[in-house]
Amino acid sequence: MQLLKAKFINIFGKGHEVKYVKSPLRICPLGAHVDHQNGLVTGMTLDASIDMAYSKNDDGYVRVQSLEFPDEDYFHIKNVPDLLPGFWGNYLRGAILSLKRNFKITNGINAVIRGKHPIGGLSSSAAVTTAYLLALCDVNGINISKTDLIQYNHWVETNFIGLNNGILDQSANILGEDEHLMFMDCKTGEYELIKRPDNMEDFEIVVVFSGLTKMLISTDYNNRVDECKVAAWIIQEYNNEKRKVLKDTRLRDVSTETYYKYKNLIPGKFAKRAEHFFTENQRVLEGIKAWKKGDIQHFGRLMFESGESSIVNYESGCPELITIYNILKDTPGVYGARFSGAGYRGCCIGIIDPKYKEEIVQSVEKRYPAKHPEYKDSYQVYFSKTNGGAKIL
Ligand code: GLA
């Protein structure tokens, strides 16, 4: 936070009451690509975070400088600029618009923001959005519950950015607790924070960054979401059920029994998407049981299976991340691994036995750059521990 403070003073001068927000990056060990279908997900928050120093601007101006990206975003709260494709400041703009739907926002913020990990796959977008929302609520005297914060954050992705994702990223980032697994039912919003049992072997999280960055909005992400909805429609049609408009249809609307009844009649890729959804929900339930028993080996095996299903059934991912997934699968000391987020860019994550860190680094070093030499200078291997959810310090 020292660097942030120095930068803040550099830009805005002394004499402001400066506060800090810490908003962690997240991983999703189990429950991939099911949140947008109202499925079951798990999440953990890392000790790597997006950090922001801010103060109130009672003239109503919003002025934010990123330490990683060029250009500041600077405007008046009354005139929030439109989305600028690819611009980091979009999440700030979206956060204000999201709150403005229900609250009177009169004060702006002066802020400096930074993130420690390479962007992509650890949900830095949900993390920055939470940081802006917390700061804006604070300077405008707005009290907001964690579950509402998830919804205000999610609105930014779906209604401002245009990514039709679910609430996994926001839930993990906001609800996460150190040494806990967050379990969320995206249909009901009910969640559980499950502490790591004392008998569970030690673990850490490995993050292998591919070197590949791109925004999810420019990937096949939204197409997959639609394919899932069409799969739900097809099953409902076979079952003579009344269908909703596609926009409001989710695979979770279909019962597991109905799915297994018509499974073999679903055509092509729609069958694969549905298979991913129903088996992934099952893996989450099994994973929760394993976690509660302290059985990290079993939990890890389910992560590998989830990774496999994301590749084979959900057909997400990219060659670089599939290479990393396969390396981690073959490396001793890795309990389980999968794509961190959607898998189109960013990183793979694994839950590992800390005794094997050295071997894990060597295994990636030996195989990844040899297969993808274009990323030999940009790929990275990190180790992280868990930490708490987003908060004002
Ligand atoms: C991205 C999305 C999430 C979720 C994951 C895949 O991180 O933002 O909503 O769908 O991909 O599980």
Image (spheres, rainbow, N blue to C red):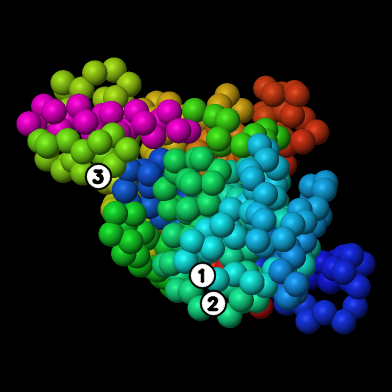
**Residue type at mark 3?**
Arg
Work out which quarter of the rendered image holds the C terminus and state it. bottom right
> Residue 318, percent across and down?
55, 27
CA gap between label 1 and label 2 equals: 8 Å
Give the magenta-colored segment's residue range: 221-240
| Residue that label 1 marks | 103
Does residue 222 appear in the picture of this structure? yes
Identity, as a three-letter code, of the amino acid under mark 2: Ile
* 377, 105: nearer the viewer: 105
- Can you give x and y, in whole percent of width and height, for residue 155 in the image? 47, 53
Question: Which mark identifies residue 60?
Answer: none
Between 340 and 255, the one nearer to me in the picture = 255
Whether residue 349 is visible here, answered yes or no, is: no
Residue bearing the label numbered 3: 252
- Find disc 2 in the rendering and name its residue: 142
Task: Count the labels in the image.
Answer: 3
